[in-house]
Image (tube, rainbow, N blue to C red):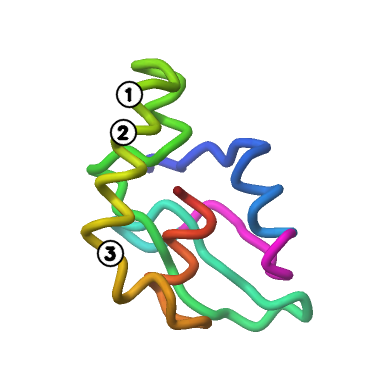
Amino acid sequence: MYVYHLRPYHKLQARRLGVVIKPSQKHPYKIDVFSRDGEYITSIGDRRYSDYITYAEDDGYEVAERRRELYWKRHAKDSKVEGTRGYYAANILW
């Protein structure tokens, strides 16, 4: 089974949001998000697609910044509602 490798970037972003993250056991997600007391919140990120740090590692930060900009444009509406899947995906993966 494929397990997504959490990077320090993801852990830092999760800490900033006050949540705990673990590689997801649910297909096709990358990350499961939990509250500090261990309560499951949601799963985020589709394994078939890259995220900011993956683009940065594979293609460089210039490409990653452009992809981040495009992601935020596409998801502007759903990424601002705190507590939603879109909110956590935007703030942890991008």
71 on left or right of 81? left
- In the rendered image, residue 29, in percent from the top left (x then y), is placed at 36, 57
> Residue 25: which quarter of the image?
bottom left
Q: Is the C-beta separation of discs 2 and 1 under 8 Å?
A: yes
Q: Which residue is mark 2?
A: 66
Q: CA distance from mark 3 to mark 1?
A: 18 Å
State the extent of the magenta-drawn residues as a range: 16-24
Q: CA distance from mark 3 to mark 2?
A: 14 Å
Q: Which residue does the image show at 28% across and 64% down from the upper left?
A: 75
Q: Residues within 10 Å of mark 3 (few under 14, many from 20)?
A: some
Q: Which residue is mark 1?
A: 63
Q: CA distance from mark 2 to mark 1?
A: 5 Å
Q: Which residue is mark 3?
A: 75
- In the rendered image, residue 49, in percent from the top left (x then y), is placed at 25, 42
> Residue 57: which quarter of the image?
top left
The total number of labels drawn is: 3
Label 3 element class: loop
